Image (cartoon, rainbow, N blue to C red):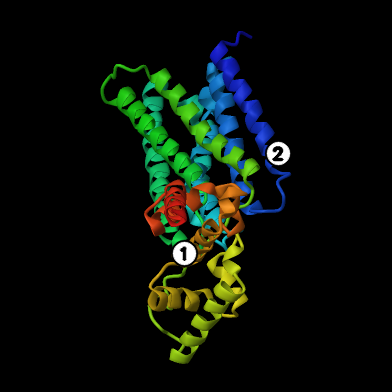
């Protein structure tokens, strides 16, 4: 059996995927539902890579008869990617499952595969039959995966739009999920190029190269997210309201006295207890601390404070940071250590919030304070 360098490279990637499948199993018990989906995607990717690397070693007749069975797994990619994002980013969705009809195309296709095996020997014009079959397969898989890519992107956009309503920090996992979806988009573009090259018009790029590039791109997206899960197991979630949840938009269910009570409790928590110094602070944690619901708290923040949760909490953190700079704490501690001490959980969130609130970078502000102090000395 002769294996090219490229095929050996694919085998090595398969080994890495298998390692990740087992390694994810030992992540501390966080997001086990989402991690399980990543394991499924890694397993599917490993199967595709195996078929791509070593498929030519099988008899042509064997592949023609049974090869379609592997294609069934393409119909699981879209639903699994969507399920992964839903389970990972939204609380109460840790064990979220799509309705069974989302997997009906896969079940129908596997039924067709058995029918194909049954009639295979009676097919007279195999070339014409396979051309039709490949065109239908490619078009169906392209449309199906693209639909879930669009659905997943909408879900991520919702998270981006509402993250500041519920979290006091930004999460790097979003960048990784964006990379995953961009890779999947590029994968689908190459898939479309493959359909055009095979069935419409010859392109300058060879079809085998299109397949190879597509295969690697698809793997990169899953591998990146799988690796990130190992490196950063802690992900903070937000709510995904039901269509009939309107409390965040109107006063439904509570009066002016309750609004004032919530304001007082929020002020006490942030000013007296300095709860903003908790780096993991989120809307749900604050709601639990002051014994109210996230919907009511969100309404009060948006309508009474006229701020998002992110803006309110980080204003307190920046104010605390500024006070420490005035007390010359920066001469004894690093800027980042002071930022972490006042509640920020990442350097990027701190710099972003500081710039938004003061219109200065931390370095610029410190220089400004030091210049003022020198002038006072004269």
In percent of width and height, residue 66 lies at: 55, 28
**The N terminus is located in which quarter?**
top right
Q: Residue at x 52, y 83 (%)?
A: 264
Residue 171 seen by the camera:
yes
Nearer the N terminus, badge 1 or badge 2? Answer: 2
* Position of residue 21 measured from the top left corner of the image (x, y, whole percent): 67, 38
- The residue singled out by tag 1 in the image is 315
In the displayed structure image, the side of residue 94 where residue 127 appears, left or right: left
Residue 321, relative to residue 180: is it above or below?
Answer: below
Mark 1 and mark 2: span between their CA atoms? 40 Å
Could you tell me how many numbered marks the image carries?
2
For the residue pair 224 and 275, the one nearer the viewer reads as 275
Residue 23's disc number: 2
Say whether residue 118 is visible: no
Q: Give x and y (percent) for residue 181.
A: 44, 42
Crowd class of label 1 (few under 14; some 14 to 19; many from 20; radius 10 Å): some
**What element does badge 2 sit on?**
helix
Q: Name the residue at 59% across, 70% down.
A: 274
Around disc 2, counting alpha carbons within 10 Å, would you say few (fewer than 14), some (14 to 19), or many (20 or more)?
some
**Looking at the image, residue 115 lies above or below residue 153:** above
Which residue is nearer to you in this view: 324 or 250? 324
The residue most toward the front is 378
* Local SS, label 1: helix
Q: Residue at x 62, y 27 (%)?
A: 14
Q: Nearer the viewer, residue 307 or 53?
A: 307
Tell me whether the residue at label 1 lies in contact with that at label 2, contact meaning CB atoms closer than 8 angstroms.
no
Q: Residue furthest top?
A: 2
Q: Nearer the viewer, mark 1 or mark 2?
A: 1
- Position of residue 67 relative to residue 295, above or below, is above
Instruction: Tell me where residue 245 appears, x and y as whole percent.
Output: 44, 75
């Amino acid at each position: 059996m002769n294996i090219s360098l490229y095929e050996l490279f694919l085998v090595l990637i398969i080994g890495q995927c298998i390692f990740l499948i087992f390694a994810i199993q030992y992540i501390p018990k966080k997001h086990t539902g989402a991690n399980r989906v990543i394991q499924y995607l890694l397993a599917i990717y490993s199967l595709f890579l195996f078929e791509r690397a070593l498929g030519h070693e099988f008899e042509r007749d064997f592949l023609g008869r049974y090869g379609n069975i592997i294609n069934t797994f393409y119909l699981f990619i879209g639903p699994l990617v969507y399920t992964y994002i839903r389970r990972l980013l939204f609380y109460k969705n840790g064990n979220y499952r799509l309705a069974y009809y989302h997997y009906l195309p896969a079940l129908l296709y596997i039924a067709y595969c058995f029918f194909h095996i049954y009639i295979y020997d009676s097919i007279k014009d195999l070339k014409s039959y396979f051309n039709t079959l490949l065109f239908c397969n490619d078009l169906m898989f392209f449309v199906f995966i693209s639909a879930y890519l669009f659905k997943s992107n909408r879900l991520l956009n919702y998270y981006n739009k509402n993250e500041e309503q519920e979290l006091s920090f930004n999460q790097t996992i979003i960048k990784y999920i964006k990379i995953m979806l961009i890779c999947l988009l590029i994968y689908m573009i190459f898939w479309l190029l493959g359909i055009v090259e095979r069935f419409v018009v010859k392109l300058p790029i060879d079809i085998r190269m299109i397949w190879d590039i597509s295969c690697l791109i698809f793997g990169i997206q899953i591998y990146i997210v799988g690796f990130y899960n190992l490196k950063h197991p802690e992900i903070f979630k937000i709510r995904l309201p039901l269509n009939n949840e309107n409390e965040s938009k109107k006063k439904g269910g509570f009066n002016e006295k309750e609004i004032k009570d919530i304001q007082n409790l929020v002020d006490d928590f942030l000013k007296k207890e300095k709860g903003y110094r908790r780096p993991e602070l989120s809307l749900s944690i604050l709601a639990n601390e002051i014994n109210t619901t996230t919907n009511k708290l969100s309404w009060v923040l948006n309508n009474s404070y006229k701020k998002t949760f992110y803006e309110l909490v980080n204003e307190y953190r920046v104010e605390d940071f500024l006070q420490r700079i005035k007390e010359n704490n920066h001469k004894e501690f690093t800027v980042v250590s002071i930022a972490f001490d006042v509640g920020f959980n990442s350097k990027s969130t701190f710099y972003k919030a500081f710039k938004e609130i003061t219109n200065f970078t931390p370095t610029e502000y410190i220089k400004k304070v030091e210049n003022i102090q020198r002038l006072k000395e004269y």
